Every structure is written in C-alpha cells, then in structure tokens.
Image (cartoon, coloured by chain):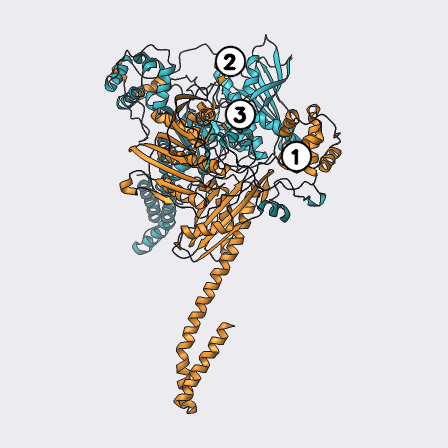
Chain colours: A cyan, B orange
Amino acid sequence: MPDQEEFAFKAGPEGAQPVPRKARSAAKSPPEPRVRPTATDLAKGQRDISVSEFFAKNRHLLGFDNPSKALLTTVKEGVDNALDACEEAGILPDVRVEIREISETRFQVAIEDNGPGIVRAQVPKIFGSLLYGSKFHRLRQSRGQQGIGISAAGMYGLLTTGKPISIRTRTQAKKPAHHLELVIDTKRNEPRVKLDETCEWEKPHGTRVEIELEGAYRGGQHSVDAYIRQISLANPHAQITYVPPRAEEHGAEHVFPRVTNEVPPETREIKPHPYGVELGVLMQMFRDTKARNVSSCLQNDFSRISSRTAAEICKRAKVATTRRPSEIEREEAERLHQAIQATKIMAPPLDCIAPIGGELIERALRAEVKADFYTSISRRASVYRGNPFLIEVGIAYGGSLPSEEPVTVYRFANRVPLQYQQGGCAITKAVASTDWKAYELQHPKGAVPVGPMLIMVHMASVWVPFTSESKEAVAHYPEIIKEMRLALQECGRLMAIYIRRCKREADEAKKRAYIEKYIPQVAIGLQQILGFSDRDRDQVVSNLTQVLERSRSN
Amino acid sequence: MPDQEEFAFKAGPEGAQPVPRKARSAAKSPPEPRVRPTATDLAKGQRDISVSEFFAKNRHLLGFDNPSKALLTTVKEGVDNALDACEEAGILPDVRVEIREISETRFQVAIEDNGPGIVRAQVPKIFGSLLYGSKFHRLRQSRGQQGIGISAAGMYGLLTTGKPISIRTRTQAKKPAHHLELVIDTKRNEPRVKLDETCEWEKPHGTRVEIELEGAYRGGQHSVDAYIRQISLANPHAQITYVPPRAEEHGAEHVFPRVTNEVPPETREIKPHPYGVELGVLMQMFRDTKARNVSSCLQNDFSRISSRTAAEICKRAKVATTRRPSEIEREEAERLHQAIQATKIMAPPLDCIAPIGGELIERALRAEVKADFYTSISRRASVYRGNPFLIEVGIAYGGSLPSEEPVTVYRFANRVPLQYQQGGCAITKAVASTDWKAYELQHPKGAVPVGPMLIMVHMASVWVPFTSESKEAVAHYPEIIKEMRLALQECGRLMAIYIRRCKREADEAKKRAYIEKYIPQVAIGLQQILGFSDRDRDQVVSNLTQVLERSRSN
C-alpha cells in the first residue's frame, strides 16, 4: 500500500472522522465484475454463533454500553448474586463491595459475601459461561434470572483488560477455600481455568469475586454510590460495606447496617400455572413428561390442578384422561389448551414471592429521607401470563424534599434498584398515568408529578419481564401497570388526606390569628359604645376568645 | 385440594386478578421449618440454559411482545432475509408477502422471493436454530446481523399455534424444489424435521417461508401496511407484492413497483479495523491466527495494516515483528494495543457499505408524498468503534404535509424501516437536537420540530448497534449522532434557503400588488396637478409599472 494513500483518522469516541475523498471515490467506482455467488457458495458462510460471541458484540444489551455503566453493572451483578446466595441458604447477608482504582479508566471490583459458597466443580461454568445457572428454569423469586450477569461482567473485564476473573470460595469451615482464575472462551462459550488452587481464607464460608475492567467512576443518579444506597433501602436485612475508589476523597469505608435481623421468608419454587402456558409449551410438556397419562401429567406438572380439575379439562377437550401424553396430537393439545382457559382454576400459590412488606418499606424510607409524611402499601399478589407478582409502594412527602421539581421515583424489581431506562419502564408509566391532581399535587400531562415527594415502587415476581437483558426497566404488561396504579392510588389517597388536613389547619390558623387580632378592638369598641368598665372589656375579650376556641375545636 | 378452596380468576390480558384472602394468609404465615440448603444442594440446580429457551421466555426482546407486533416482526424478518438473499446473489428482488387470516387471532404469513434458494442441507439450521447464520461473523452491510430473526419467528409460531414452519426452496431450474416442515427443539436449540420432500414449483429459483402464528392485524404507524410502504421506499430496486388479509376490505393485492433496475452495488466483506479492536479480542486473535509472526498477523487479519505500519506498531510496542503470535503475553498484547491506538492508520475500506444514494432517496420521497420541496444528502462514510458507517438524509417540505403537527421521521438502518422505540433511537435524538429554528421551523425544546416536513434518515453500516435484539432503535453512539446531525443540518440549510425565498417572494408579491393598486391613483393625481393629457397619464402609469418591474427583477 503506497504511503501517500495513508490517511490518519482518530480512534476513540471524540467524533466521527471524515474519510479521504480518494478512498470514497474508490468505493463509488463500479466494482470489478465478480462471479455472483450461488446458493452453494452462500451455504459455506453459514455457521453457529456462540451466545458469548453474540453478547460480546452486543454488550450494550447487557448493560456494558459505556465505561461508567460497565462499572455499575459489574457491581450490580456481583451484589445480586451475593444476596441471592445468602438468602437461598437462609443466611443474613453481609456483603462487601470494594472498588479499587488502578488508573483513571481501569478498576478492580471485588464483591465478597458470607453466603454458602460454591462447590468447586460448579465455579468454572457459573463464572465462565453465559446462560448457565439455577434460576432460569424454576419459578421462584430471585434477583438473578438469566444465568448471564456475572459471567458477562467477567467477559467484559477480559475483553477490555485481558485479565481473568478471580473467585475465592469456601463452603464449610472444615474444608479448604478454593481460589480459581478463569477466562471465558467466547467462541465456544466455555470456561478456561487459568489457576486452580486451595488457599487460606479467614471466612468460614462465602464467596469473593474480583474483576478488573475498563470503567469510569462517576457520581449522580446512575452511580455506583446511588446503587449501593438503593440496594440497602430495598434489602433492609442486608448489611452492606462499601469501599469506594480513592478513599482520601470519598471516605474509606461506608457501612449500611441492616434495619432488621429477619431473613426474608424463604420462597418456594412453584410449577407453572396452567393459564400462563402456551400451546407450544403444553405440547412440549406432553412430550417430556414422566407421567403415564394426561390426567396425572396435568396434576403433576402444573400447579393448582386437582384430579377433579384435570377430569373437567379432559372432558371439555374431549380427550380421555387415560391417554398417553406422548401420543397427544396437535389438535388434541389445542383442545386441551382451550379447555384449560375455559376451566376455573385456583390462582397460583404465592409463597414463591417474598415482598419487603409495608412496615419495612416505611422504615427504610424514614432512614433515607427527612419528610413530614410517610405511607406504604404491600398489595395482594396478582398474576400476569400465569406468573404471580406483587406490587409494593412507599411514599415520603414534604420535609426536606424539593417542592418545585418532578418527584423522585425509586424503581425496584425483586429488591434490585433499576437505574437506567426510566422512560421505558412500566413503573414510570404507572406513576405518570395516575391522576395526582386528585391528590393535591401538580401534574403535567404524561409526565411524573411535581412536588416534595419520593415514590418507591417494588415489583416482586417469580419472573420479572425486563425490557432488556441488562434488566433496567419492566415491560409494559397491562396487568402489572394496573396493579401499580392501584397501589399508587391507595398511597396517594392517604397522602392527600394528610395534605388536605395540613392545608385546613394552616387556613384555620390564619383565620384564627386574624380574628384574635381584632377581638381586643371589638372589646374596646363595645366599651366605648356601652360604657363597659375595663373589667367588663377584659371579660368580653376572654369570652370571645373562648368562643373562637370552641368553634375551632368542633 | 378441597373444592371450596378453588377460586376462579380469569386468564388473559384483561387485567390482574386479586388472589383470594385465604391463599394470601397462607402465604403470609411462617413457612414450616425446612432444612436450609447447603452449597452442595444448591449445585444440583445449576444447569445450561439453551438460547432458544432464553428467548422463548424473553420473546419481547425479539419483538414478539404482543400479537400485532408479532405479526409485524414475522413479516419483517422474512422480508429482510428475502432481500438479503437476492442482493447477495445479484438478483433484482421480487418479493411477495401474503397474510392470510385464519381467525381473528391467527394468521398465516408467507414470504416468497426470487433469490438464489437455499441448499437443502442448510435449511433446518437456518430456520430451526437460533444464533445460526452467515452474517454475524463477517463485516459487511446486510439487513440481518444476528442469525436469530426468522428462526425466532418460527419458534413464536410453534409456541402459539403448535404448527411447524414450512419452507419451499429451489436453487436451480434444473434441480427439484425442496419442501421442508420443521420445528425448533427449544431445550436443545436444534431443528427437528417433520417433513422433507422434493416437489414441483413454478419458480426456477427462490424461497418461500410460511409461518402460522397468533397475531393481530392492525392499522397505523406500527402496522404491516406502513412497514411495506417504508421498506419499498428504502429499497427502490425491489418490487414488493403485498396481499393483506381480508382482501374484500383491504384490496386483493398491492404492488409496489421498483423505481430503479440497478441492484445496489455489491458490498465486500472487510477485516476488522485495528482501531475498533479491544485488548481481549486482540489477544484472542493472536491465539487463533494462522500467521507465523506478529507482523503478518497484523497485516493479514486486520484491514489497512501494511508491513510498514505493522513494523511501526511493533517498534512502538517494543515487540519483535518476528514473535510467534501464540506466544504473545498479556503485557505485550497490551503494549501492542496501545501502540495501535497511537499509530496513524488509514480509515477502513468503504465498499462494505451500500448507501441508497441521494438521488434515489429523493425519487422515493417524491413517490411517497406530494411536497413543494425535496432535498437529500448521502454523507461520506465515517467510523465508530472501528466500524464504517454512512448516513443519508432526505427531506420533503410543504405541499400536502400537515403544517401544525410534529414532523414525521422515517428511520432506516441498512434499508430496513424502524417502527418502534422512536423515543430511544439515536435518529430521534439527532433530529431533536438539531436547531430547526435556524431553518425557519417551530421547534419545541427537546422534541422533534413542528411543520410540514417529512424526514427520512438512513444509517448504513457493517454493524448497526441496535438497542435490542428486535432491532427497533439505534444505540446512542456520539460518532453516529454527530454524523446524523451534520446531514440534517446540510439538508436543513437547503430547505431554509427555499423557505426564505418563498417568504421573500410572497412579501414582494404583496408589496407589488399594493403599489400596483396605487399607480393609477398617482397618475390621476399628477394629471390633475400638472394638467396632463389622458395620454400623458397613461404614459405615467406605464412608466411607473416599468420602474416597479425593473426594481423587482434586480
């Protein structure tokens, strides 16, 4: 390539660079005639795409769009896993988050928990393979759902710094701790173990994950600091210790103590509810079931189907209860699917969900902001697409909250704060579409209301429908938005009663002060007209004051 | 389960249903003590998640959120593939889209093309396996990128109707056509062939895909009809025949003829540009390369690296050009990575992109709307994260376009219209952040401008960074937004010149009419004062009119 053709353009995000005219004109000139490919030629290019390659190229889908978000996402995925692990083992979580600045664009993130630890054999796949985990296939509330998060963070670290992810884990005090370093082979979506040793560790059980990555540490609404505050708000049973970078500037160690010593009630795994199952899934279940006949398949593989209900469904579908599931034809499956929708079936069991609870939400809000009024509600569980879910709302009003700005909305899903994509979230939609004018707030159409208020909305479910893999916003299911609005309205009504009482009291105080000011004048007037003594005049003042007092207390 | 405990709740999207008090109180009571799981117990639940299972559960990520969007997405994925196939083989596309209504909620979609056909052996994986295809691993502009689309549509059809996807394909007139029916095994992400036969077909070559699915056919901005119109707009070389459902209502067959007979210039595959390669990827390339030394690896596996440039990079990184790539350590790779960023390297080649071209955009706009003014621009190619891209903008102004409404923005990426997520798209951001007041339009802050205008923005690239797998919006890369704004400004300036000229002409016409009206009065006045004859008076009128004429033409 001749040297004079070389043309410099800057790499990096500073801006798009023009391309030299020469290169452009080359592109414009008709390409030299080439043999057009046939179907056979085209077939040669076809190949499998590994899920890690896919997400490495599309990393913004996982929350690694830019350096500061990458840092936040890494912390988030680590803490999610730490809290899930502790709760599954019934341990009060004690989580430590450390961020060490290596250079301005490079950080080491460490997340350490006191959870049950991880069996050595499972470590490589959990941390070095996307789409691997225990939470996807079960119906039970947890922070993680997809089996992507922490391995994706490790992959991002590897891509940007070439450094492996480091894991230290121990399952019992009497067993040694394991220390592994591994990288993900993105072409195969498989872990490659670089270091595997047993080691000393002062923790009797727990896990510590370390990832080095290109990142940026920033303040504001989307910062790691804001995340840590909010995660502690939604997890009052967890103690979180946070060591920010540059301790000299940001303080050495921030401890967010737990507000309660109770681990959230253990959630149970449930079977799919028949109403949420689609025809294709139903057919797949018939193929895969261990049950010998349709009736027992319906009873065993779904929740809330008794033998009576199974018989009713089969009768309606004109399918014998004794049919072998594997022999069910598509047409029969379709009739069964329709029959299920037409049959009364009990709502799914709800011990798969662990709400925070109204009382704890209020306590957490009191710890978070200085306000005049607090209220909260934990709704009854409800169902979308067969999945149980539950909405909780907390409101803080007045006090130190700014009165001329749009209200702050804290969004949570399964106790995890959602910090990005506020505009695209069902929670924002529910807040914006509630009629806040009825609750004494200013409310610009289509936006969140304006006033001294902080709203916290929490959705707990066995499956939160996120709008992207990075789990930043809840999708707009009408059932979910409806429940959120009902909860907001319930809190709004209580808040409005408080606001109106305050207004009434303020009005009365003003009126009273006004009248009080004139009582002595009235008495002096009476004295002059009727020739009262000074004693009579004072008596009139005291009588009128008493009347005012009485009328006010009514 | 006792019968009286049964409680009916409705399935379906009508709204969330309350759960009976009884069930709720059961959920609230403390769970019976259970043995807490250990790390070993927890390990048993860990397993692989297949990518099809993942997307079946998260189908909204792929554009199957609701029935009407599902129908649109299915059509879109089919047409994308059809156009890509024709262009790769250098064939002028002739695409037929048929939608047949089976019931109000069930449709059969068929997409037929005159492309090169597909080799029999490739059919099952292309249509029955997610993340499989020829477009992901290469750097070259195409509509499809991910190897997900059409198989996901087939999977959605299977899930909702239990019906397989049907494919008819033929590669040459002298060979028979193949007809396959297949379903995706979501647990394994593998195709299962249900029918495999050769058959008669009147087409010498081409492919026809049929998918039956739950859907809804609606009108409006997000409809299939709007999509077909827009795809024809961005693909003036394609003829599209559209058979909507319910022919009696919607017309039997709509033909969108081609505006040009030239197939877009063939795009070439390029190698990654060194500026866009991350450290981790660089290390992987060193491991996988066939080159014997670092210098030839840099030259062969990247675009725009000459032996001179390779030597410069190695020198800067203090790595010998003769080192074996597989022996390069992390630290050396990091030095090489930094050296690449610091070295002047020619911009990537641009024949990997096929713009529509300003002229064709204008022609398409003229066919689309009746306006007074049209302009368009096809920018020079630019680069983000090492990927070449190019922005094109067309504007239609005035005429029949509504003047008091926000302007219409048609968004396109690699010739595919983007219909959803307008708010989250870089194109909308670029339009909203351009100063349209300078171009004589009303422009509410932060929104799109108001006026009789239609804007068409097209991004062509070897890799369009979409905000989700459903490819609905372009991610906010600053380089991309900057290029879009420059293109919009260029068109805006031309439009403003036109608007100002129109205004000036209107002003002058008004002034002229005004003066013309008074010229006879002036002449009569002069006649009376100076005693002109009628002939003199008429002469004055004609002289003054000439003066006016001359001053206007200056």
User: Mark 3 is on which residue type?
Assistant: Ser
Residue A322: name its quadrant.
top left
User: Mark 1 is on which residue type?
Assistant: Glu
Q: Which mark is residue B129?
A: none
Compare residues B158 and A467 and report the one nearer the observer.
B158
Q: CA distance from mark 3 to mark 1?
A: 33 Å
- Residue A101 included in the magenta stretch of the image: no
Which chain does the residue under circle 3 lie in?
A: A
Residue A201: name its quadrant.
top right
Judging by the rendered image, the residue that carries numbered circle 2 is B43
Badge 3 or badge 1: first in the primary sequence = 3
Q: Tags 3 and 1 in contact by the CB under 8 Å rule?
A: no
Mark 1, Cα crowd under 10 Å, few <14 / some 14-19 / many 20+, is: few
User: Mark 2 is on which residue type?
Assistant: Ala
**Labels 3, 1: one chain:** yes
- SS at mark 2? helix
Specify the quadrant that holds the C terminus of chain A. Answer: top left
Judging by the rendered image, the residue that carries numbered circle 1 is A104
Q: CA distance from mark 2 to mark 1?
A: 38 Å
Residue at 30% x, 56% y is A529
Which chain does the residue under circle 2 lie in?
A: B
- SS at mark 3? loop
Left or right of residue B337, residue A169 in this image: left
